[in-house]
Image (cartoon, helix red, strand yellow):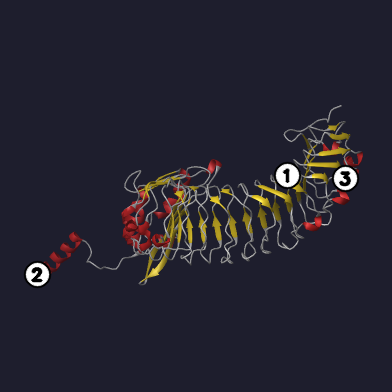
Amino acid sequence: MHRGILKLLALVLALAIVGPIQGAKETEEDDAQILRLWRRGFNASKNLQPLLDTWVTDRPCTRKSWGIGCSLIDGEQRVTSIELILKGNGPDKVYLETEIPGTLADLPLKTLRIVGQSSYPSCRIYGDGPGNLPGALWKDSSSLSTLVITRCQMEGRLPTHTALPPNLETLDLSYNRLTGDLLGGWVNLKRLKAVNLEGNRLDGELLEAKWMPQNIQEYNVGANGLTGDIPNWSSLTKLRNIYLQNNTLTGPLPAALPTNLLNLNLQFNRIGGSLPKWTANQALQILFLAGNKLTGTVPDLSALKGLQELYLDGNSMTGQLGAVFPSSLMTLWLNNNAFSGSVPSLPYLDNLVDLNLGFNQLTTPPPAAFLPPKLQSLNLQGNQFKGFMPNYSARPSLGLLDLSQNQLKGTLPGATLLPAGLQNLDLSDNNFIGQLPKDWAGLSHIATANVQYNTGLSGQIPTEWGQAGALRVIDNLVLKPGTGLCGSIPGTLQGKVTNGQKELGSLGP
């Protein structure tokens, strides 16, 4: 009898020494111990301490500890997500510095998300020491599908596919300090759908389609130091969003795009050549090509039936604007190119609300009948328009009208010649003459008006402008310099008349 008891005690003692039996069921308490150990290594601001103190518990799921999410696994509440979103500005600024320990791989994590502030350094994340990536967690966690560590000053080389969770679906390491080039081995991450590496220090060239994750839907490597040509990714049929902006990519645009692509952002690179028609991309909605070195004319883009926003500003495109655009367009920016001739008739663009043709070499301002019927913003500044300003009263939805830096002549248009809903008017730097229109006093929606640098303008501010209810929402009225306007400023306009930089107390003699 005593021998049996002694043998039993010996077995219990042995188990206590070697640890739990292999395969023993893990519990919420086990997860809590991992969190508490991690918590001890945090270097955090005082205002985060009350939140982190909620981790000092055996029941993080039951207590609903800060940033902790749980799910029921085999009848036990287990920690399946950690989301630390660092918020706070001014006196409430926060800071968190921590190692990502390999023991986190022992949690059944599906999501790890740590997000720092964009306005100041609020987060620093590293592996077993500053400058080292937390690779132990990544490669050993088979359950992790979403990994987000952004704006956390994380350093080191971009990890290979062997150092990433094998079942990863979303990877966001944006706005850190990662270096190295893009790695073709990621093609082995069969479930990877979204990659965001924007705002790091990556270099080298983009991957060819065969080295890309084949199920990729969103790919963002903008704001790095990538070079070379843009590959043909048309075989990646699941790809919806491509963000390659703010790199130093060169070469021509690819002849074909993924057929289901929705958004393509290539702005602020060094891409040359002409703009393809891309007739097979009826799903494309937003196209950013601004700030490149594109040449030639705008081709017929009517086949892009889903296109809503087109940005071609800041290139070297030339010729007349005879292209046919898709009627789905809502925003069209062609400014800062070298287009010439007249503005084409665009009333068929019945969804267009924002049209920017500024800083080209256009010679004839468009009449109202040439403008889209729902247009809200029209920027025609910096062209070569001469003659009289057209009557735009037939486009009452137009809220912004900019015809500055042209060579328009005649008197300033009366209120009846302007859109009824006009809020911002810029006619500066032209050749207008005469006095300020009295009936502008009835422009009930106008917030800013600029007529400076029209040397032929003279006289005083009309007395009608100073009456009660006149120009009732005006906030900035720019009348000087470069005009012959003079006299006092009515009391109702005091503090609202400027020279474009500072308030004027008087218009002078």
Q: Secondary structure at mark 1?
A: loop
381 is higher (above) or lower (below) than 420 = above
Amino acid beneath label 2? His
Q: Secondary structure at mark 2?
A: helix
Give whichever of discs 1 and 3 has the lower sequence position.
Answer: 1
Q: Secondary structure at mark 3?
A: helix
91 is higher (above) or lower (below) than 37 = above
Left/right of residue 369 with respect to residue 196 in the rendered view? right
Residue furthest left in the image: 3
Left/right of residue 2 with respect to residue 384 in the rendered view? left
Q: Which residue is mark 2?
A: 2
Across and down, in percent, residue 227 comes to 45, 48
Is residue 33 among what the camera can see?
A: no
Q: Alpha carbon of mark 1 to alpha carbon of mark 3: how far? A: 29 Å
Q: Which residue is mark 1?
A: 383
| Circles 2, 3 touching at the beta carbon (< 8 Å) | no
Across and down, in percent, residue 111 comes to 42, 61
Quadrant hosting residue 78: bottom left
Give whichever of discs 2 and 1 has the lower sequence position.
Answer: 2
Is residue 35 among what the camera can see?
A: yes
Q: Label 1: few (<14), some or many (≥20) within 10 Å?
A: many
Q: Label 3: few (<14), some or many (≥20) within 10 Å?
A: many
| Circles 2, 1 touching at the beta carbon (< 8 Å) | no
Q: Label 2: few (<14), some or many (≥20) within 10 Å?
A: few
Left/right of residue 182 with respect to residue 435 in the rendered view? left
Amino acid beneath label 1? Asn
Q: Which residue is mark 3?
A: 441
Q: Of tags 1 and 3, which is closer to the observer?
A: 1
Q: Residue at x 37, y 54 (%)?
A: 183
436 is higher (above) or lower (below) than 285 = above
